[in-house]
Amino acid sequence: MSFENQIIKTNYHTHMYLCRHATGTIADYVKQAIELGLTQIGFTDHAPWTELIDRSVRMSCEDYPIYIEELEEAIKKYSSKIKILKGVEIEYFKYKDSHYRHLMKDLDYMILGQHYIEMNRKLVSVYRIHTIKELTIYKNTLIEAMRTGFFKFIAHPDLFLFSQKKLSSEVLGLAEEIILAAKRFDIPLEVNANGIRKGMIEVEGEMIYRYPRKEFWELVKKHEAKVVISSDAHKPELLFDEAIIEAVDFCKTHNLTVEEELVFDS
Ligand SMILES: [Zn+2]
Ligand SMILES: [Zn+2]
């Protein structure tokens, strides 16, 4: 895709080849970002976990040093042209603080991408949850995660609605609790362009995205929580595409206040 980007300055949710379902090296994304005129690019490939069963969709622990090395090299080579931030996208599980602290030694930030919930000592994919009990666990997990202060923002917070058709008031209540917590802890919620790339579904005669899920973002507006837009790019050319333009439009339609540039301590 070759059209000129004039609407985004940053992207803080970017993958690369080590997770095994994205393509491109760190340098490939950085070069693309420079071409697009971005001022900052943050990398957040799927973090390694020793215990997670889905090894095929995240980097292995052995690959983590390669990830950091590629990032350091790119920072050396391109820092005069763009600010490069080192991060990971990671799930929150209880009692794993030492793992987060270990990763953070090398990183600028982590984003929460809760792809699993823990139920009866088993992990259940968030794409498959649908009962109130499951959705409540998701909500509680996100709020606990926010409380730890480990996470810079929440990737696709509305992913738990993936399997929902019409949203009941009970489900909307859970969404509202997540949003109020984000506001309380001052953590931005992410409008994820990758959800837009996955297309629309019909709910009661209306075509809507599964995520970003419009009812969720209407509540974000109601409470004026902070918002970021991310590409969630798994290919360099997806740093800027029609889905990003659509995500920006989505935020405009819902009158959301988008944080264009995040502040980092280092
Ligand atoms: Zn991914
Ligand atoms: Zn992602």
Image (tube, helix red, strand yellow):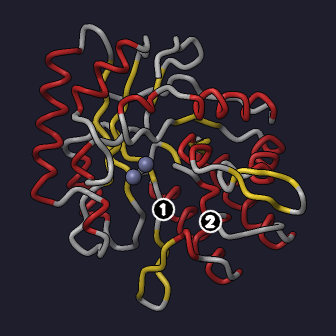
What residue sits right under mark 1 in the picture? 114
Q: Is residue 27 left or right of residue 173?
A: left
For label 2, the residue is 160
- Identity, as a three-letter code, of the amino acid under mark 1: Gln
Please, is residue 69 above or below residue 117 in the view? Answer: above
Asked which secondary structure carries label 1, the reply is loop
Point out the image quarter for the C terminus.
Answer: top left
Relative to residue 44, is residue 30 depicted above or below? above
| Rendering coords of residue 193 (x, y %) | 57, 40
Respond yes or no on whether mark 1 lies under 8 Å from ligand 2.
no
Q: In this view, does 249 lie to the left or right of 66?
A: right
Expressed as whole percent of the image width and height from the top left, the position of residue 243 reads 59, 34
Q: Which residue is drawn at 38% across and 42% down?
A: 234
Tell me: residue 185, above or below residue 28. below
- Measuring from the top left, give residue 261's x and y in whole percent: 51, 23
- How packed mark 1 is, by other alpha carbons closer than 10 Å (few <14, some 14-19, many 20 or more), is many
Which residue appears farthest toward the front when viewing the image?
1
* Residues at marks 2 and 1, CA–CA distance in whole angstroms: 9 Å
Circles 2 and 1 in contact, beta carbons < 8 Å: yes
* Identity of the residue drawn at 68% across and 56% down: 210
**Could you tell me the amino acid type at mark 2?**
Phe
